[in-house]
């Protein structure tokens, strides 16, 4: 069913009989499993929301699973035992949470409910969806009867799957790593709803959310999933609610709202910004001036199918539209709410505006929720525009990813420079070790030179002593020891030669000392050049 089809039947004043007499349409089925996506449900239940009685409610729906015979238009116009009793209006709101605006009770069926038509839907949905799709959508706009809502939702979603229900019973026997987190959030989920605040309702909600966390490990658990499951449990048994939940997540692409990167949710927020720009330019400009982005207020609408801050009767109507059509209904409802509150929005600044959008935006429709559905039908959303916005989002997302990759490349380059610096510092350390080794060798050489000098001095002193002894010896002794003197002269000559050799060695060692000093000066110059290069590299790294 296209947007044009909806607009053509949006007038609620169309007579029932004339609607049923409309010629068969070749339009596509409104089944959500073919064309739609879905948002999530995080809703606080206020004092005026329906009050299901647990198993009685679920048992009642279960008894109605088989198509019932056609109902006469006057047989069920009043309140039946299947309807949900009105909730106590004195219920205490959750601490720290705003009470949603008051709305008509969901159990009150519209005066123009065509029970015969809905009986035909239950008995032969495929034929009605094919031949009277526009009439079906007109009745959905008016609201699915509360007593039939669970069965109709399953028909819309085409969720009846015995194998999936058996899989659910099997999953209940398994353990989930998210059980503690689910238990922690149960009391905070629908804090104003009696059914979900007693053990029976909390057990049902726990079972359903735990089973889905096991069924779809890529999604796991998020509190928003519990809020989506709540309205389903109010209208059908657990195993059937599980089947519809799986259809919402897969067929309606609601799973993309809970993926780790939330890419699909961000895309739909981007599309909503584009639709506001197209249809509410003044509101868009005001949001821009105040720094308000759609994800600040509408993400909870889309992730929870408006259930986080809205009453159940409105949430049920949202489910009617999404299951009968597609996720596009969320965009229509969001734009309709903003358009209805345009004058108030334009008068508020950032803090008050954000508070209003999160808590009080439904106040304008508190007297008649159906008017919101009617206004939503009048919103024109061209599928090609949504596709274009989706492509623009993909382009911008890819661009952002490219920038992130460039930043990562710079980080890698910086790491390489840091590694190079560390390597140079290691090389500098090695050079310093080599310098210390050369210095130690120089010290040892100096010590050797000093020792040689001492030996030379000793030899000179010995030669001097010998010469003096020779000069003082008497002549007779001189003759007598002439031979000895000759020997001594020979020794002296040898000593002189050795002395000469030692002096040559000393000269050689002095030359070596000079060479070592030159090498030391060269190493100092090289070390200074390396220190300068290191300083330059550090400055280069600092500039990057």
Image (spheres, rainbow, N blue to C red):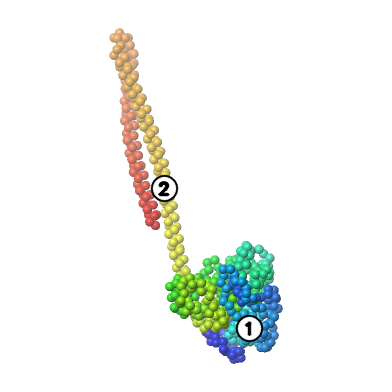
Secondary structure under the numbered disc 1 in the rendered image: loop
Q: On residue 334, which mark appears?
A: none
The quarter of the displayed image where residue 53 is located = bottom right
Depicted 418 relative to depicted 503: above or below: below
Mark 1 or 2: in front is: 1
* Residue nearest the viewer, comparing 127 with 270: 270
Residue in the picture at 64% in, 76% down: 87
Q: What percent of the width, then of the height, locates residue 404? A: 45, 63
| Among the 4 quarters of the image, the one containing residue 184 | bottom right
| Residue 207 image position (x, y, % from top left) | 66, 68
- Residue 354 at least partly seen: yes
- Numbered disc 2: secondary structure: helix
Q: Position of residue 38 (x, y in %)?
A: 57, 75
Q: Crowding at label 1, few (<14), some or many (≥20) Cα neighbours within 10 Å?
A: some
In the figure, is residue 178 to the left or right of 465?
Answer: right
Q: Tell me the tag on residue 109.
A: 1
Pick the front one: 159 or 435: 159
What is the residue that sits farthest to the top in this orientation?
476
Quadrant where the C terminus is found in the figure:
bottom left
Q: Quadrant of the N terminus?
A: bottom right
**In the picture shown, does residue 427 fall above or below 47?**
above
* Residue 490 point in image, percent of width and height: 33, 18
For marks 1 and 2, the one nearer the N-term is: 1
Res 161 seen here = no
Q: Say which residue appears at 68% left-offset and 82% top-offset.
A: 80
Q: Could you say which quadrant of the image residue 166 lies in?
A: bottom right
Give the labeled residue for mark 2: 425
Residue 270 appears left or right of 46: left
Q: Residue at x 61, y 75 (%)?
A: 47
């Amino acid at each position: 069913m296209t947007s044009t089809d909806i607009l053509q039947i949006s007038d609620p004043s169309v007579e029932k009989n004339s609607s049923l007499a409309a010629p068969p349409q070749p339009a596509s089925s409104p089944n959500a499993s073919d064309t739609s996506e879905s948002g999530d449900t995080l809703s606080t239940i206020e004092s005026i929301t329906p009050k299901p009685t647990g198993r009685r409610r679920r048992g009642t729906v279960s008894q109605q699973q088989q198509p019932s015979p056609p109902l006469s238009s006057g047989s069920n116009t009043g309140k039946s035992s299947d309807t949900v009793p009105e909730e106590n209006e004195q219920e205490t709101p959750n601490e720290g949470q705003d009470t949603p605006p008051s709305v008509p009770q969901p159990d009150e069926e519209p005066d123009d409910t065509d029970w015969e038509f809905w009986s035909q839907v239950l008995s032969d949905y495929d034929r009605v969806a094919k031949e009277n799709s526009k009439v079906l959508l007109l009745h959905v706009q008016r609201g699915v009867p509360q007593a039939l809502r669970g069965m109709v939702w399953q028909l819309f979603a085409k969720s009846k799957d015995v194998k999936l229900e058996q899989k659910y019973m099997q999953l209940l026997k398994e353990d989930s790593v998210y059980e503690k987190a689910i238990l922690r959030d149960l009391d905070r989920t629908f804090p104003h709803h009696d059914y979900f605040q007693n053990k029976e309702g909390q057990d049902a909600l726990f079972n359903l959310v735990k089973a889905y966390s096991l069924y779809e490990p890529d999604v796991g658990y998020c509190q928003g999933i519990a809020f989506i499951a709540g309205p389903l449990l109010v209208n059908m048994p657990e195993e059937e609610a599980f089947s519809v939940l799986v259809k919402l997540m897969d067929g309606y692409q609601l799973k993309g709202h809970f993926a780790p990167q939330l890419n699909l949710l961000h895309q739909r927020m981007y599309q909503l910004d584009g639709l506001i720009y197209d249809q509410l330019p003044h509101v868009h400009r005001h949001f821009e001036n105040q720094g308000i982005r759609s994800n600040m207020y509408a993400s909870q609408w889309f992730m929870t199918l408006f259930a986080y801050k809205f009453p159940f009767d409105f949430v049920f109507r949202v489910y009617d539209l999404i299951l009968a059509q597609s996720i596009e209904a969320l965009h229509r409802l969001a734009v309709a709410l903003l358009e209805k509150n345009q004058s108030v929005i334009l008068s508020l600044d950032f803090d008050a505006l954000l508070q209003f959008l999160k808590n009080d935006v439904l106040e304008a429709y508190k007297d008649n929720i159906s008017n919101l559905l009617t206004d939503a039908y009048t919103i024109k959303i061209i599928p090609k525009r949504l596709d274009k916005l989706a492509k623009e989002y993909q382009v911008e997302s890819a661009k952002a990813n490219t920038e992130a990759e460039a930043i990562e490349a710079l980080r890698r380059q910086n790491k390489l420079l840091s590694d190079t610096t560390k390597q140079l510092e290691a090389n500098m350390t090695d050079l310093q070790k080599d310098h210390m080794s050369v210095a130690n060798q120089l010290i040892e050489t100096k010590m050797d030179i000093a020792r040689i000098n001492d030996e030379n001095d000793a030899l000179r002193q010995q030669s001097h002593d010998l010469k003096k002894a020779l000069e003082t010896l008497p002549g007779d002794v001189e003759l007598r020891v002439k031979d000895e003197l000759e020997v001594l002269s020979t020794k002296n000559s040898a000593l002189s030669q050795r002395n000469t050799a030692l002096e040559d060695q000393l000269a050689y060692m002095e030359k070596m000392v000079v060479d070592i000093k030159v090498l030391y000066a060269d190493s100092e110059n090289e070390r200074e050049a390396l220190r300068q290069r290191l300083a330059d590299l550090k400055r280069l790294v600092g500039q990057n």
